[in-house]
Image (tube, helix red, strand yellow):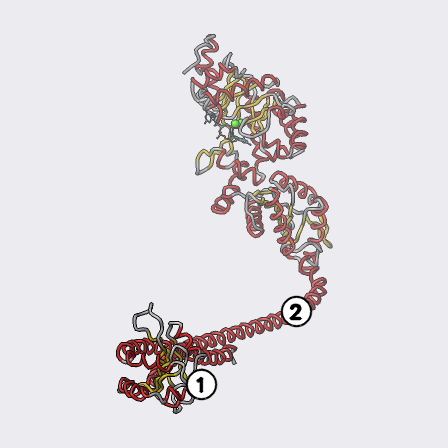
Amino acid sequence: MAPSSHRLRWFALAGIVAIMLVTALVARIGRQTALDEFVALSESKNVALVQVFSNTVWPQVAPFVAAVSGLSGNDVRLHPEAARLHQAILAYLNGLSILRVRIYAPNGVIVFSTDAAQIGAERGTDAGFLAARAGSVSSELVGRGEIYTVEEAIDDRTVLTSYVPIRRGGAVTPVEGVVQLYYDVAPALRTIERGQRRLVLGVAGVLSILSAALFLVVTAAGRLLGHQHRELQRYGEEIDGAHATIERRVQERTQELLTISRHLEVEVLKHQTEAGALEAQILHEPATGLPSRALLRDRLEQAIILGRRNGGSVALLVMECGASDGSDLAWDRRKVDGFARQVGERIRGVLRKADTVARSGERGFAVLLAGAGDRAHALFVAGRIAEALVPAFSVEDATVEVPERFGIAIFPDHGDDPEMLIHRASLAMSVAQHAGSRAVVYAQEYDQRTSRGFELMSQLRYGLERDELIAYYQPKLDLKTFEVVGVEALVRWQHPYRGLMLPGHFITMAEQTGLIKPLTLHMLKTALRQADSWRRAGLEMTVAVNLSAWILQDVRFPDEVAELLVAFGVPSSRLELEITESVIMAEPMRALEILSRLSGMGIRLSIDDFGAGYSSLGYLQQLPVQTIKIDKSFVVGATKNADSVILRSTIDLAHNLGLSVVAEGVESREVWDCLAALGCDAAQGYHISPPVPPDQLTRWLKESPWVVARVAGQMESPPS
Ligand code: C2E
Ligand code: CA
Ligand code: CA
């Protein structure tokens, strides 16, 4: 049960009690007020009545009162006047609703009474009489069984009695007697009681209605509150229920997960045990014990992640190792594996610990160079592996030679995921196989123009054999004396059906496929032959040949150059080799060794494209070079302020270091003048002469305006 219903009952009970109390109080107050009013009214009526009496009857009575004064009760009764007065008074009272009248003499003796037996009685001590004799009216209700002093029984009726003083001359005259009047107030009381009953009933009714209404409101409110209370309780219970359900579910789920996790733990343990055995099979290739493709891919991924974080590079070399005569194609699996094991061992022998060699496919190997895996290092490692594979292998009864073909891809230059790098390194290897090159670094053009690339490479190979590669020559002129300080040999490919091709179209590919070595040697021969021919014609000059990266990693190169110098009878001081700074930076130690040997032979060395790279002059000074060639990109803007500042400081610094300075790409008279003003030593460019075939240069050497001006000693006004 709702707690309010209990209270509600008390509330109802208290309401009833309150109504009863209020009604009783109202009744009592109402009755008292009504009676007081009634008494006051009756009294004033009595006063008026007595006033009339004193004016009419009293003059007859007064002498009698005076006459009987001092007589005994009986004598008063028997006084001869008494009967007449009695009649007169009764006549006066006739028609008035007065039950009894007494008249007192001032001494308290009753001189008249409607009850004749009382005449002559002494009542001088009566309180009402005493008050009236003192001048004031007093009244009281006397009823049967009432608390009021009962003087005597009057037919069982409630009466009002009033003591009224008699004064004939108003309030200032002496009291001559006292009249006591008795009224029957029963009818009046009945009327009062009737009114009172109505009042009580009305009040009680109104209060009851109000109370009932209040009760209803309270009950309704209570019911509403009770309802809400029950609702809240229900919600509370529901929430408790939901809570319990969730808790139970969580417990169940936790239990479930615990079970699963225990189950998984067992599974993992089981798998670990199995995996231990499996790993060797999955991650290592069984026949050679080398890492498998899967492990390679994994390590490659790790290396890429590391490289990405440290900004390092990763190189991937792939190679195919088959017998050069193709005899291995007839071998059975056992023999192939035996051969692969030997190859794997040799490759591993030249690698660092951190590098990985994996077997991929029957004849395939892949080498992962982590850490400093840049292009130059990759080419270097390819060279070392190639050296290691030179001694012939003996496989069972056969002796096998291995032609090395490497494909190289570098992270981040050529891709940033293992698959991409593997794919591109493989592509580069195909290029190497087609071109008959030892190692090819992936280049973007292979993706789109692979077949064209393959084609061009094999054509270049044959082109070299068929002397399609020729040299054009471009003179370098002393800016002060106009003397030809040398000529630079620049390769051109006289392609059978593409026409004359500039080096930009094939040098990079030649560098990547290893064809650059035969190309360079071919250019050296050509240039030295030409130098010898000019020397014989009385034109003594230095010829310059450009060198590529690969060459400076090849320790046999200085000896080969020396042999050529001897073969063509050209003094080493007449040969100049141009190298770009990036070539030196790639593998500085080995490059320095080779450069020192070349320099030691008396060959002049110059740094090509100076300014395009980022090495400092200070560093280059440690190299055995005599000249720097300032890159075209700086020379073109020589007349502009910013570039001229760079040019001036470069030239000054180079001079301070004892280097001579050649500016390449001189295309105008203005640039020439500018360079002359800056103190540059020599100039090369279209303004002087473009690269031309040897015959043309021979003519130029004799007839050009520069030569004419020099001969004439007119170097102040160079040709425009
Ligand atoms: P390089 O060594 O800087 O050669 C100078 C290049 O500038 C040549 O381009 C030449 O034709 C061009 N040139 C000459 N004067 C001017 C001029 O006034 N203005 C402009 N804009 N260019 C001028 P080429 O012959 O196309 O050779 C391009 C590059 O190919 C060479 O740059 C060199 O790095 C390379 N190269 C040429 N021949 C050989 C070679 O026999 N072996 C090797 N390894 N590289 C070679
Ligand atoms: Ca050059
Ligand atoms: Ca250059």
Where 254 sits versus 81, above or below?
above
Residue 681 visible at all: yes
Indicate which label's residue lies in the foreground, 1 or 2.
1
Judged from the image, the secondary structure of the residue bearing numbered disc 1 is loop
Residue at (68% x, 54% y) in the render:
291
Depth check: give the residue in front, 487 or 251: 251
Label 2 packing within 10 angstroms: few (<14), some (14-19), many (20+): few
Residue name at image x 62 percent, y 73 percent: 252
Look at label 1 and name its amino acid. Val
Which one is in front, 654 or 681? 654
Q: Quadrant of residue 578?
A: top right
Query: Could you tell me residue 301's position as x and y percent?
Result: 61, 51
Q: Name the residue under label 1.
A: 150
| Residue ranking furthest to the bottom | 155
x, y percent for residue 276: 72, 62
Whole-percent x, y for residue 378 in the image: 63, 41
Q: Is residue 396 above or below residue 197?
A: above
Labels 1 and 2: the sequence-earlier one = 1
Instruction: Tell me, yes or no, if residue 216 can be seen here.
Output: no
